[in-house]
Image: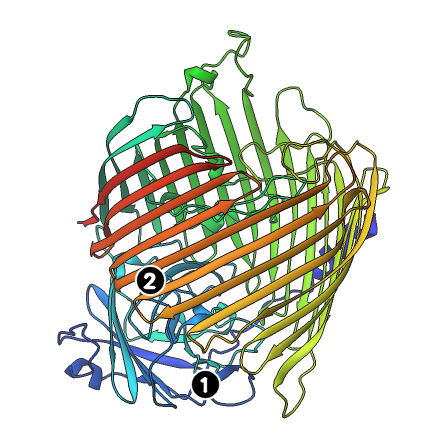
Amino acid sequence: MKNLLLLPIFLFSLCSFAQKINSSYQLHIKKTTSPIQIDGEMNELAWKNTDSAADFFMVIPMDTSRARVKTTVRMAYDNKKIYILATCYLKNPGPYMVESLRRDFNFTKNDNFIFFIDSFDDLTNGFTFGANAAGAQWDGSEYNGSVVDLSWDNKWVSKVKSYSDKWIFEAAIPFTSLRYKKGITKWGINFSRMDIKVAEKSSWTPIPRQFTTSSLAYTGTLVWDEAPPESGGNISIIPYALTGVSKDYDRSTPSKYRKDIGADAKIALTSSLNLDMTINPDFSQVEVDKQVTNLDRFELLFPERRQFFLENADLFANFGYTNIRPFFSRRIGLGVPINFGARVSGNLDKNWRIGIMDMKTKADPKIGLPDQNFTVVALQRRLFARSNIRLMFVNKQSLQYDPKKDSTKPTYSLYNRNLGLEYNLASANNFLTGKAMVLKSFSPGKVDGDFVHAANLQYTNKKWIISWQHEMVGKNYQAEVGYVPRNNYIKLNPQISHLFFPKKSKVLSHGPVFISTFFFNKNFNRTDNEVVLVYKFNLRTQAIIDTWVAHDYVELLRPFDPTNSGNARLATGTQHKWNAWGASYTSKPQKLFTYAFASRYGGYYANGNRLFLSADLGYRFQPFVNITLNANYNHINLPKPWGQTRFWLVGPRIDVTLTNTFFFTTFIQYNEQQKNLNLNTRLQWRYKPASDFFIVYTDNYYTDPLFVRNRALVVKITYWWNK
């Protein structure tokens, strides 16, 4: 085991300093004194005096040639804004392909132009902006070198105009909407183009096809004629006001009427460090979670969608692994309102990043929940070409709380703390990535078995992906403000995949993927094991076919209902094993009607069997209406007392986008397992950049018999004010 722990450390030490891969690709940006109007036309004098980026490289389907579709990009700036104009030429005549005018669209299902800014030139963190061919905007923050968080939202303007042989994207981004280091004259930058009709993704700089065009390791260089201007006194106040009514029919309580106000504030301490504050925040406009049929033994993870927690979220939320998170922001304000909070986050310089968050939640006397304070501190130091080391501290504190005061109420912890250190590896060319981490929790009465260690290492090239991951979580490790669904285990997870590239075939690539996951107890006795062999086919049309077989073994560590519906439970210590197989197909995105199917059939707990079928259907009346339907069906056959169990989950959704600032969504979810029918309708009008008017209506029903559970209507307005 000691050798196992030393292996990732030895391999991490192989990382060394390296030059930027695409440093020779340079675009010079000059200051303009003539005005630029954002109208999708290149008729201003300012554009005629700019350098251009052209001759893009193909990334998909293959990365061995120049792009077939031509794209030209120009940039300029003045004292307040950066300007960009991209001319996207068409190879084949006919209409563009888009889903809708909805913001932050699906990259692979829309003709689009997107660019990525590495404003610290650190190859790790940045911003992304762009639009699809119908003018729907895209913006997000970027972390870990390539991961894009589209929940980030900021103030900027753009326009797309279509012509017979091209479409033009033009945008202006205020310096106040970006974070960058004062005085530097070189930023990382890259431009990406997706043309669905010719099934091509292209990039200004050459990028290996196994990586996304968002990979900051492969950016070129934006060379400024002088250092970008300081953003100055950048203060944004974002107040909101709302009114609403709700009624709980379950408890037959009177209707509740809401009249709330609150505000967020963003204050730029420097051009790269931001202070965010919130008072009485409200998140009623946030889209509802997509429901699932839950047949898992452990808690499921749903993503954070609340805007306040999203800027520089990687500093806080990306520590650890998917199932080992010492901090998970959805734990804050879970079922209780947030009084106020503040966060300082950003870059101190090219090498140091910092994040400090403090949140205060209200007490709930009905259940004895005290006032609680949540503090998170993260400090990150860049190492080598693109790697970093990070320290995190998380504290949850109950305020003025005596658990012995009222024995009739639930007992809450006085405090829970986590301290962690992690090293993130990313080689200069991104072929080698990995992580090594240690965590310790501090809770009253817990003095042993409260450590976590985990590490992984992955090698990726065009044909091979080879990875190793292991985790060790102690019996008494607790992360009350995190997401750690199980503890007291050792996990080993090797994976290997290979791709073949046939010539002159409808199949672009194909190959096997082998994944094995083992769980052991502290004595290294096996408790869980899953072995999966997948064979993938990627067609030149961008359709995808997968087939797979799997073997599962489970020794239950606690009682478990295999239907998760409140029935009888299988006993602790019982052993279960089965085989299963399945297949999936995803259609090419070039058609107005798209579809995907998946299936699974095989054994299940207690020598039972399970059939799973799912379908995702979509049709677009582009660009104004997009209709989707997700449906899945589970048929579980078990011995008595369970017998046969059937679960339907159906979720039709209609998105109407009359313009790129006016959106209407209706999302219906029928979940047979939860015996719930949910209706959520959401109207959003972006009447000014980053300022919105919302009307949100939700309705929940029991399904057997059909009966109203609760209803709510909220009308909310926000306004983004800049100094």
The x and y percentages for residue 600 are 69, 58
Quarter of the image where one finds residue 241: top left
Residue, disc 1: 198
Which one is in front, 647 or 285? Answer: 647
In this figure, what is the number of numbered marks? Answer: 2
Name the spot of residue 385 as percent of width and height, x first. Answer: 55, 65
Q: Residue at x 35, y 62 (%)?
A: 139
The residue most toward the bottom is: 504
Residue at far left of view: 34
Residue at horizontal 34 percent and vertical 54 percent from the top: 665
Please state which amino acid type lies under the numbered disc 2. Answer: Arg
Q: Earlier in the sequence, mark 1 or mark 2?
A: 2
Rendered image: mark on residue 102: 2
**In this image, 585 relative to 474: left or right?**
left
Q: Residues within 10 Å of mark 1 (few under 14, many from 20)?
A: some
Element under disc 2: loop
Q: Nearer the viewer, residue 465 or 677?
A: 677
Mark carried by residue 485:
none
Residue 530 in percent (x, y) is at 77, 53
| Mark 2 Cα shell of 10 Å, populated few (<14), some (14-19), many (≥20) | many
Q: Nearer the viewer, residue 117 or 59?
A: 59
Residue in front for this viewpoint, 84 or 240: 240
The image position of residue 78, as x and y in percent, is 20, 69
Residue drawn 23% across and 45% down?
A: 718
In the figure, is residue 90 to the left or right of 303?
Answer: left
Res 186 visible? no
Task: Judge left or right: residue 201 versus residue 552.
Answer: left
